[in-house]
Image: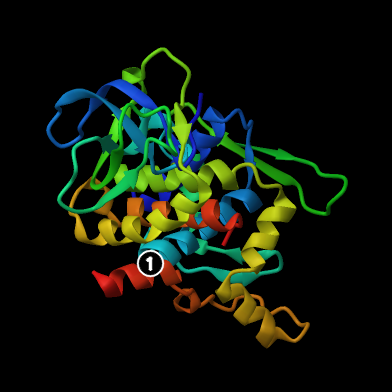
Amino acid sequence: MNKIEKLLLFILDRAHKGGIKDLSDFQVFKIFYNLQIYSIRYTGSELVPNVNFIREKNGPISIDVYHSLEKLRANHYIETKVIENKAYIYPRHANRLGKKSIKFDFTLGETIFLDNFLSDLLLFSQKALKELTYNTEPMKEIVKKEKGKIKKGEILDLKKVLIDQDVMEAYSNS
Amino acid sequence: MTFLIGDIPFYDRYIFTDTGRIAPHYGFVLLPEKATQYQSSNLCCVITSKTPKAWGFLLLRTKYPFLDKNSYICFNRKDLVPKSGLDNKIQPRGRLSRSDLNKTFKLLKKSLYIIKDFASDKYIRGVIIYEWKKAIQGKII
């Protein structure tokens, strides 16, 4: 199992442990994206290397994450219910842990990092998650270039993420 | 009781992560418990009355009267201390003042990059800096 798949299961595991019944595809993509951003900003590198995100109507999505979700569904690690949503044109894909499970092998540092940020991100509403996502440097950069017309399919440049100043300062003083 | 950054609980069994040694000590909480809840532990710096050679932050008994004597937060050692070692009395015993929290941030940051222990892991370092900035500035970055 690759790290994207393990991270997806970890997110759903912590949602389950936190009493959250399921997560929509939108939540899964945005939480995954924001974990990558936090990792770059506070550690200087991606949590999962080489994952591309592209601009979609509602913000970044990842084909790598999409394929991993599909694989986990096919292998019964994730159960997905498609629920009609009258308030919205698209149905909600409600994801939760399936019958099969894994033992997570993230390092202690990665686990503490994930638990810290997930404890916040999992409580965010879809609206708040969208707002957080649109406030990241790669999304701001794309939106600035779009001038009102969404550039679907454009790859987000994660190199635009700024390293936190205190992290930088501590590195340069060490 | 879940702890936040700056809380000072008392452990009658404070377990040092690197050596496994156990002794009664106050701990200084470095991360909110949401980060370490699945480890059933708190990330702490030990507090001791012995004057450290370096990396110590003095806590005066006049300002922190729950302490028996003047003591030091030792930023040169960080431990993931099991909550099972907490004593049964009211916890935390105290909390670092906001002004002392601001003063210690610089020392803490430096220690994270110079002292080589499990907290110098880049992910733990990053989380500590993120959460401390939130605690000090009162905002999410």
Q: Is residue B110 visible?
A: yes
Residue B6's x, y, as percent?
45, 42
Q: Nearer the viewer, residue A87 or A163?
A: A163
Q: Residue A43 appears in which quarter of the rendering?
A: bottom left
Disc tally is 1
Q: Residues within 10 Å of mark 1 (few under 14, many from 20)?
A: many
Circle 1 residue: A167
Residue extending furthest top? B88
Q: Residue at x 36, y 29 (%)?
A: B67
Q: Residue at x 57, y 35 (%)?
A: A96
Query: A141 above or below A16?
Result: below
The subunit letter for the residue under badge 1 reads: A
Residue A150's x, y, as percent?
72, 78
Query: A149 above or below A123?
Result: below
Query: B21 above or below A15?
Result: above
Q: Residue at x 46, y 56 (%)?
A: B102
* Residue type at tag 1: Val
Q: Is residue A78 visible?
A: no
Residue A145's x, y, as percent?
66, 87
Say what secondary structure mark 1 lies in: helix
Q: Nearer the viewer, residue A94 or A134?
A: A134
Residue A100's x, y, as percent?
43, 29
